[in-house]
Amino acid sequence: MKPPAQLVPPMPGRRTTSRNLLAGLTVALVATLVAALAPTVGAAPAHAAPVLLSQGRPATASTTEGGAFPASAAVDGNSGTRWSSSFSDPQWLRVDLGSRATVTGVTLVWEAAHARAFQIQTSDDGSSWTTIHSTTNGTGGTQTLAVSGAGRYVRMYGTQRATGYGYSLWEFQVFGETGGGPVDPVEPTDPRNPNLGPNTFVFDPSTPTATIQSRLNTLFTQQETNQFGPQRYAVLFRPGNYTADVNLGFFTQVAGLGMSPDDVNLNGHVRVEASWFGGNATQNFWRAAENLSVTLPAGVSVERWAVSQAAPYRRMHLRGAQNQIQLWDGYTGWSSGGLMADTRIDGLVVSGSQQQWYSRNSEFGNGWTGSVWNMVFQGVAGAPTPNFPNPSHTVIPTTPLVREKPFLYVDGTGEYRVFVPALRTNSAGTSWYNKTPAGSSISLADFFVVRPGTSAATINNALAQGRHLLFTPGVHRITEPIQVNRANTVVLGLGLATIQTDNGTVGMRVADVDGVKVAGLMFEAGTTNSPVLMEVGPAGSAASHAANPTSLHDVFFRIGGPGVGRATTSLVVNSDNVIGDHMWLWRADHGDGVGWTVNTADTGLIVNGDDVTMYGLFVEHYQKFQTIWNGNGGRTYFYQNELPYDPPNQAAWMNGSTRGYAAYKVADSVTSHQAWGLGSYAYFNVDPSVVAERSFEVPNNPNVRFTNMVTVSLGGVGTINRMINNTGNTVNTTNQVSYLTGYP
């Protein structure tokens, strides 16, 4: 039985976000300025002053204007000679530094014909490139850029000219230090006996039941409360039958290694409870159950999955029509948001005090009962009858375009492979129950297995050789971006493997190519501010990927919590047609390294690409707009947000003359956008007098449509004045919940 919404305890359980003159500046003076300034950038530890690495080195270019302005003229130290390209886009100028170097600064001395949009890129092999600086607002003149990257080759890659002429550089100067970190050999992967690292445990039916249970108990004891430790674990079961009670703690993934969930059956439980927090499940994050079937013990009819964000229950089968799965801890507390996808529950789903939930492409044999604020069902057989907001069920019959998450399995010969599900259009129900999954299979021999301590340079070298990536459980610290440039590359993490950005680098950049799949990873900010943790497509991306979109599955972001973390934006999507399949972008509101001026982060998600679709999007606590959508044709199915808890006062949280920033901002230039099932909550516990003017800010256009929204003042602590634009009731101490079924 679900408690009525008004009986849910109001106290939030949440931890719960002319230029030729400039060109005449002497090369020596520019070099002196860069050398003097570069050591202070980012307040990094003292190093030897960066040196000019590019002068006199071999240089090549995409084109030269009539052959009279060669590439070498841009690296000859003479400010009176220049390289100039033909009159088209794109164009590039490349310098070979002779050996791998750490690159900390680049100076471009432009002739009047300069770049409006360009990137600075590095490469170890001259063919696979990592972007270390990108702009669409190039100023021309002399541009001095502080960058962070490494490689033997450095190039300026221009994508938009500022004039009707080509690109023209008097000087292209690269500064840094020789030696850019180790590039280790790319190990081959034995697909029958892969080294998945010390934190991956693989069981088969011959493993004694006591051995399996002892390992599970040890992991749970260690991880039950360990939400901010560096430990990460994956527990994998080969096809067969087992008896096991899997009680999942933080940063633990349990998964079957069959082609179907029914290939692995656990007689017992796969459960999450909240005893460690007094029954309050609102901090039960970061764990996963995937690709398993579960048969409950005799006489037991309840499975408990009491979770909140970043805890997918994906490609699962809970057997027995008489059974039920409960999404809260059972009359003792709250839970606050989760995902169920590609899953079959033979019996009943009971949401109880679960505050919001997204179910996609699943099958509920005996249906669903329960509702608090925002429950969204998409492509779900057995979904309840829609009657938003009484109860608050949003039901969407089909899923327009989705690809299920890739997964690791063992085939009939004993070889480890990764299955990549095919795109499905206008789908409902699971991809596997009583059907043969469509997709392709890749041998693990084609993957580079990444273990903690592997440098980003080595990872990029593996990618340049055409390998896919499998990240083993652990924290992977990187000092330069991981660059995914090849179409159809699969990047898969086990055990919620975490990429932590050191030295202010970007964590991962995905090129504007078809069909990249990134799944099962968390990106975490380091102490030095990163401009962005993950970028999908460089700025200005415009290629259509409608037939084969890039997709992100169970990809999570964290700013602070284990300690200080800083990143201006967590995720930027520049490519068109990208699919997001369950993501949580979180600026920490509890843990270590948390505070208004400590774990700083402006925005969670910025979407610049067209026709981008998000399924199950959670964005919380950023200090400006939580989500900014600049592309046309965007769609979001389920959105959950909490505004930042910690503005110290109203003056500290103002968008010009507007009180606060919206949770979801659709740019004024957008002409088409749709969203279904959105919730935004306020809990301004530092200064309860703080007001958010509105939660959703959108252009007034008949093709920009929002369906089924809710705003909540959690416990009456803080105010949201309007829901969307200037529409919707105020929520505050007196009126804590407000609903709206449509806008406009």
Image (cartoon, rainbow, N blue to C red):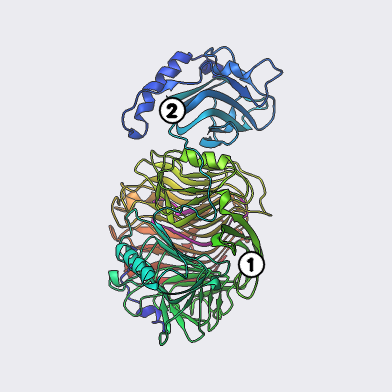
Q: Is residue 392 visible?
A: yes
Q: Quadrant of the N terminus?
A: bottom left
Nearest the viewer among 59 and 385 is: 59
CA separation, marks 1 and 2? 47 Å
Do the residues under discs 1 and 2 have CB atoms within 8 angstroms? no
The span shown in magenta is: 610-627
Instruction: Give the residue number, with chain letter if any, for mark 2.
Output: 179
Q: Position of residue 60 (x, y in %)?
A: 62, 23
Q: In the picture provided, is 213 more to the left or to the right than 511?
A: left
Instruction: Judge whether 522 appears above or below 333 on screen.
Output: above
Reading the chain from its start, which is encountered first: label 1 or label 2?
2
At numbered mark 2, what does the secondary structure look like: helix, strand or loop? loop
Q: Residue at x 28, y 72 (%)?
A: 278
Q: Which mark is residue 114?
A: none
Q: Amino acid at mark 1?
A: Pro
At numbered mark 1, what does the secondary structure look like: helix, strand or loop? loop
Instruction: Judge whether 327 appears above or below 196 on screen.
Output: below
Q: Is residue 18 visible?
A: no
Q: Quadrant of the C terminus?
A: bottom right
Q: Which quadrant of the structure image shows residue 146?
A: top left
Was residue 714 drawn as part of the magenta stretch in this picture?
no
Q: Position of residue 267 (x, y in %)?
A: 45, 78
Q: In the picture provided, is 427 more to the left or to the right than 496?
A: right
Instruction: Judge whether 387 appears above or below 673 on screen.
Output: below
Q: Amino acid at mark 2?
A: Gly
Count neighbours of disc 2 (C-alpha within 10 A) and say few if under 14, some if 14 to 19, many if 20 or more.
some
Nearest the viewer among 369 and 687 is: 369
Instruction: Give the residue number, with chain letter if any, for mark 1.
Output: 437
Nearest the viewer among 411 and 401 is: 411
Nearest the viewer among 294 and 612 is: 294
Q: Position of residue 679 (x, y in %)?
A: 46, 66
